[in-house]
Image (cartoon, helix red, strand yellow):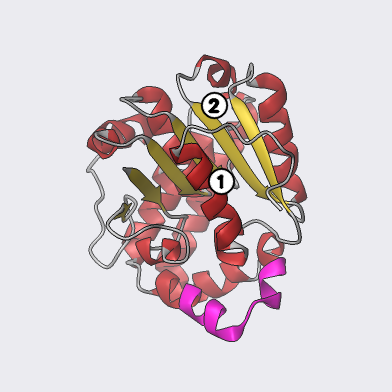
Amino acid sequence: MIGWLHGFLGAPAQWEGVAGAGEARWWLPGHGPSPWMPPGAGFDEVLDAMAPWVEGRRVLVGYSLGARLALSLALRHPGELRAVVLVGVTPGIEDPVERAQRAAADDALAATIARDGLDRFVARWEALPLFATQRALGEETRAAQRAWRTQNDAAGIAWALATLSTGRMPPLWERLSTASFTVHAVTGERDEKFTRIAEAMVQRGGGRVVHHRVAGVGHNVALEDPAAVARVVAAAAGDVRVGAPSVR
């Protein structure tokens, strides 16, 4: 059984082009029209509350925030996992000063949601350079993504942005080589930042990390080339190591 964790501002429907029927697709904490926000919880407490999501799973798949949570959850509560497939992931920020700066920046960004509303925040989010490659997608695809984003609850998204910030995520770089499962890092070749991160993960992963670089797409490979992600997930579910540098 496979579990699927969508990205920040996303929804379980994000995986419709990739996930099989009947597989578990959850709303992330802070997401959805009626968000789950564990009161007073920090990053690790949220992971502990999510621990039941690992039960009965052999593979976890996550995108962006969902990828960070999937990796964190798998290392903290590995259960019977044999693989995680992580699209556009970072194992965290190692420098404590940079981590504190990122947390403060995300707190400030979260405050703009209460001030300006979710629709304006989504519009600014979609304009980030990270998502520039998505402008080549059809309007129907982009409109569907916008609908997923705007159905979220503003207070929940602000909570998720602050509580689950990369600045509040314990860095996991040193733990990659001790993973009891295979880490499949998926990046679009046009996403230079996260491709560099994935390459560093391979170097520091002690043989536990495989990098899949997908040609012609950017950060959200699940949206821009869902078939490529599906192939990596199928290989991971079959416990097959796909070591080639590209899934194309």
Tag on residue 171?
2
179 shown above or below 49: above
Q: Confirm whether residue 219 shows in the render.
A: yes
Q: Secondary structure at mark 2?
A: loop
Give me the residue at 68% from left, 59% from top: 130
Identify the image quadrant of residue 154: bottom left
139 shown above or below 200: below
Give me the residue at 36% from left, 61% from top: 12
Q: Nearer the viewer, residue 122 or 211?
A: 211
Residues at circles 2 and 1 in contact by the CB criterion of under 8 Å: no
Q: Nearer the viewer, residue 163 or 218?
A: 218
Q: Nearer the viewer, residue 106 or 211?
A: 211
Is 161 positioned to the left or the right of 243 in the image?
left
- Count of marks overlaid on the render: 2
Report, in whole angstroms, how far the alpha carbon at label 2 lies from the one at label 1. Answer: 25 Å
Q: Amino acid at mark 1?
A: Val
Q: Position of residue 117 (x, y in %)?
A: 42, 73
Q: Residues within 10 Å of mark 2 (few under 14, many from 20)?
A: some
Q: Position of residue 36 (x, y in %)?
A: 24, 52
152 shown above or below 3: below
Give me the residue at 52% from left, 57% from top: 109
> What stretch of residues is rendered in magenta?
133-145
User: Badge 1 is on which residue?
Assistant: 232
Q: Amino acid at mark 2?
A: Pro
Residue 168 on the magenta span: no
Q: Secondary structure at mark 1?
A: helix
